[in-house]
Amino acid sequence: MEKKITIAVDGFASCGKSTLAKGIAKALDYAYIDTGAMYRAVTLYCIENEVNIKDDASIQNALDAIDIRFKTIDGKNTTFLNDKNVEEDIRKMPVNNLVSEVAAISLVRRAMVRQQQEMGKEKGVILDGRDIGTVVFPDAELKLFMTANINVRTQRRLLELQAKGQTVSLEEIAKNLQHRDHIDSTRADSPLKQADDAIVIDNSNLSESEQLAMCLALSKLRMREEAS
């Protein structure tokens, strides 16, 4: 017999965390929470409303005005910011270029973590992000930490953006990813790091189906262990 668990998926940008988490959630019929999309939505709001991200009062006012929800549309998890579908807008380069700075702000992180913990307090949920296994759900029964070669990650992001009709150079993408890695890993509040009990998966040479099969096997093993 299998018991429902909480699964935390962390790792670097463009390591396929969201694709993997969505695949696991679908296969196990678990709820999926895209925590990265929440920080992207806050970033988009700050850009569109010219919020001074260096000023705590301005950030708090922005947070008070922000409502983030997820809805399933045509089978896809879709992000809504103040009742507006922003799923495409939050994946564009202006947000990519600023999201790590916004996510490093303590007021923002604390507000998002509170929401994430509330959303995921029941078992049978999978969350992906950069601090799920260390801060949001340190007691998650299964923690996965995704990594990949920077060249592989750059190429993946390029293909992703091209598929959305965006024109960006490999050099710009590589610089953006390295910049985000540095900020995410060195920020004072809940930096990106591998949890001590996380399982590290380098998917540089794994297909989506291969890594999904591997992680599903790990998930089911942990579910059976929890039930015994």
Image (tube, rainbow, N blue to C red):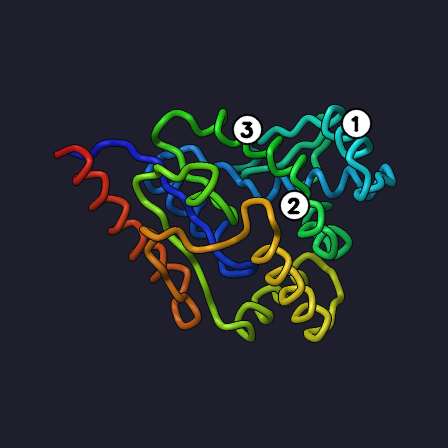
SS for dot 2 = helix
Residue name at image x 49 percent, y 25 percent: 118
**Badge 2 or badge 1: first in the primary sequence:** 1
Residue highlighted by disc 1: 61
Residue name at image x 63 percent, y 67 percent: 178
In the rendered image, the vertical position of residue 156 relative to residue 65, given as above or below: below
Residue type at mark 1 is: Asn
Residue type at mark 3 is: Arg
Q: How many marks?
A: 3
**CB contact under 8 Å: marks 2 and 1:** no
Query: x, y percentage for residue 135?
Result: 47, 40
How many C-alpha atoms fall within 10 Å of the one at disc 3: few (<14), some, or many (≥20)?
A: few
Query: x, y percentage for residue 117?
Result: 48, 29
**Foreground: 173 or 62?**
62
In the rendered image, the vertical position of residue 49 relative to residue 118, given as above or below: below
Query: x, y percentage for residue 53?
Result: 79, 42
